Amino acid sequence: MTYVLGYTMSAEEKAAFPSLNPMGRYPVLVEEGQPPLWEADAIVCRLSALTGSDFWRTDASQPDMVRWISWATHHLNRAADPVYFSRVVMPQFTQDRLPEAEIAQGLADWAALLPILDAHLGGREWLLGDRLSYADFRAATALPFASAAGLPLDDAPNVRRWAAQLDRIDAWRDPFAGI
Ligand SMILES: N[C@@H](CCC(=O)N[C@@H](CS)C(=O)NCC(=O)O)C(=O)O
């Protein structure tokens, strides 16, 4: 049996976690006869192979996909993180906020990076062309929270169009439906 441990874990599953993931984090993919697989990107890669999907590309577009995953992880999402964390997450449990300089740096980086994404999406339906891939999900990680976090999209019409496209995917728009 194959299953992904995540937000719906029982207390018993959580208690077993240290042996499944030395990071103590989820998700973790558990497959019979295989060591537990942790890190979301690796899990998507494996699930895509198991289901015969090209959501994780294995063809000539694979380097392009990895490029956007890497760029989003190391640049765009890193810029958005402190802004989102301080303005959306922290208010839910504390009066504290991240230092204003950290927010300002995140916003400046976001403003500098977003045009790169917007230019690439001009004339392309998805990041890799005409079909959705995991790169779209990774690069769009901050978009569902952009408005609440005050991450501007005003000068990025292609990004807004692409975000609206993603929102038409049920599992993207409401990932916790039914949980
Ligand atoms: N780089 C890891 C991040 C994993 C991670 O930070 N997961 C969060 C949930 S999204 C977590 O387990 N946090 C600890 C907790 O909530 O107890 C990945 O991509 O899987």
Image: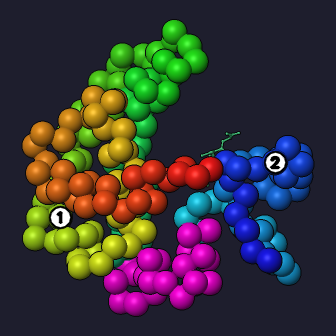
Type of the residue with mark 2: Ser
Tell me if residue 41 is in the magenta stretch: no
Type of the residue with mark 1: Leu
In this rendering, would 65 be left or right of 2? Answer: left
What residue is shown with label 1? 121
Residue 129 pos. (x, y %): 23, 77
Residue 31 numbered mark, or none: none
Relative to 139, say whether 81 is above or below: above
How far apart are the two marked residues, 1 and 2, measured between alpha carbons? 41 Å
Residue 10 numbered mark, or none: 2
Q: Is residue 158 visible?
A: yes
In this rendering, would 13 be left or right of 79? Answer: right
Identified at 70% across, 50% down, the residue is 8
Residue with the most extreme front position: 178
Relative to 85, say whether 146 is above or below: below
Q: How many marks?
A: 2
Q: Earlier in the sequence, mark 1 or mark 2?
A: 2
The magenta segment: 43-63
Identified at 31% across, 60% down, the residue is 168
Q: Is residue 116 visible?
A: no
Tell me if residue 60 is in the magenta stretch: yes
Identified at 49% across, 84% down, the residue is 53
Relative to 94, say whether 33 is above or below: below
Q: Quadrant of the N terminus?
A: bottom right
Q: Circle 2 — which element?
A: loop
Quadrant in the rendering for residue 40: bottom right
Residue 114 pos. (x, y %): 21, 48
Identified at 51% across, 9% down, the residue is 95
